[in-house]
Amino acid sequence: MNNVTILDATYDSVWMRDYFANSVYADEVGELFLVDWIYNRPRPEDDASPQYVADYLGIDMYCTTDTPYDLMNTGGNYMTDGFGKAFASELILDENNGTATGWGPMHPDQSETEIDEIFSMYMGIDEYIKMDILPYDGIHHIDMHMKLLDEETLLVGEYPDGISDGPQINANIEYVLSNFQSKWGTNFKVHRIPMPPSTSGNWPSTPWPNTASYRTYTNSVFINKTVLVPTYREEYDTTAMRIYNELLPGYTIVPIDCDNQPDNIISASGALHCITHSVGVNDPLLISHQPLTDTYDDFNPYTVSAYMNHNQGVESAFMYWKTSLTGAYNEVSMSNVGTNTWEANIPAQPIGTRIYYYVHGIAADGKELSRPMPAPNAYWSFDVLTTINVNEVDIASFKPAFPNPAGAITCIPVVMLSSAKGSMTLEDVTGRVVMDIYNGQFPMGESKYFFDASTLSSGAYLIRLQTGNTSVSQRIMVN
């Protein structure tokens, strides 16, 4: 408690994430200020409390309370990659549609275009991704089933097939993957984490209030080098903690029980992310890097490129790499190649090698930062893989297309052992091509392709993928 300052302020509830203000920087790494929305609950002390923090820290706060920029929102239904891209459920549309709130005042009356403009003006958001509301999550906040781990990685809750909100979550993620890309221009990486049931084995269902509390592991919170994770029962917590440790090596993962009496917070439809919020640091040193992926190249060096920005400039940068967790890191100076981008090379390594690395920047005023933040205890890693002779094996394979039978937008997962040009078509029972689904470069690894079955006649069809002399196919029914 020697490191904690408690502000004596009045409030109505514990849901700090929802009613507190959000940190925004001018010119990416310039002046820090706070932006506060209209809170979507009749809790006036909560709605006013961010001003206490702003006053204490001496930070300017801007509020979306007056027309034409009045906007209602909650922090649990807002996530951003820090580079102008944000996620929300369509609750943001419902609570700004000009209708009655049910407790007296009216919702702000903003079209989706006007909402997007307000987020651009106040929050610097230029791409606002909105997903369908989940039918069994009564609060409709995305932090109950999703979390951004970094600029391109989504941690998403997973139910057993066909259970509770599982189908809608899956559809929402497929919508994101098929329509949006990360700041790097690549598909988002998605990792799944189980949504645990109640002690009776039930999952959330109708009517709301749910037959089971909305237990979730994605309602976690980063505090610099530490992640606080809600926990419920050991039989499920063990898997969740393993997933967090595997995805965030070097971070301190701290379990916090949210399910046992007398402190069963999850029964109130929230967990750790819901009751906490953070204020960004003054004078930020921003470092962003897209981690290197596995490679078959054992001849050319591996270029590590990182974006670094500071309001006084970045003085120097270093990249550290090694091939054994027990070994010492090799230090390599990074070169400034322009546009705040710094680069360095890792020498080519033999097949079968796993490489661990991190980057470190030093600002002109002496401020230092590593990414991942807990480095050298944390790191990124990639493998140099064994070369595959594509003449001896099929380089392409399908995972089952879904839904099957199909009636509308249908997803086709494809797994490639190496990148190759090819085509994907849909054939009827006579072998006639009725649709060209894709023609071009298929990337190595798993990717997804889509077609609209609503225009097709009912019956059996064949999806065919052709790459060079290799052809693979799978059957699909259309309703």
Image: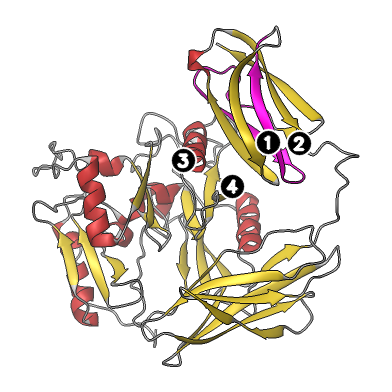
Residue pointed to by mark 1 = 414
Q: Give whichever of discs 1 and 3 has the lower sequence position.
A: 3
The residue drawn where x is 22% and y is 78% is: 59
Residue pointed to by mark 4 = 192
Tell me, yes or no, whether the two marked residues, 1 and 2, touch with CB atoms within 8 Å: yes
Q: Is residue 195 visible?
A: no
The residue drawn where x is 39% and y is 58% is: 80
Q: Residues within 10 Å of mark 4 (few under 14, many from 20)?
A: some
Residue pointed to by mark 3 = 179
How far apart are the alpha carbons under marks 3 and 2?
23 Å
Q: In the rendered view, would you say 81 is above or below 287?
A: above
Q: Nearer the viewer, mark 2 or mark 4?
A: 2
SS category of the residue bearing label 1:
strand
Give the extent of the magenta segment.
400-428
Q: Give whichever of discs 3 and 4 has the lower sequence position.
A: 3
Tell me, yes or no, whether the two marked residues, 1 and 3, touch with CB atoms within 8 Å: no
Task: Report the amino acid beneath label 3.
Answer: Asn
Q: Nearer the viewer, mark 3 or mark 4?
A: 3
Task: Report the amino acid beneath label 2.
Answer: Ala
Task: Report the amino acid beneath label 1.
Answer: Val
Q: In the rendered view, would you say 55 is above or below 232?
A: below
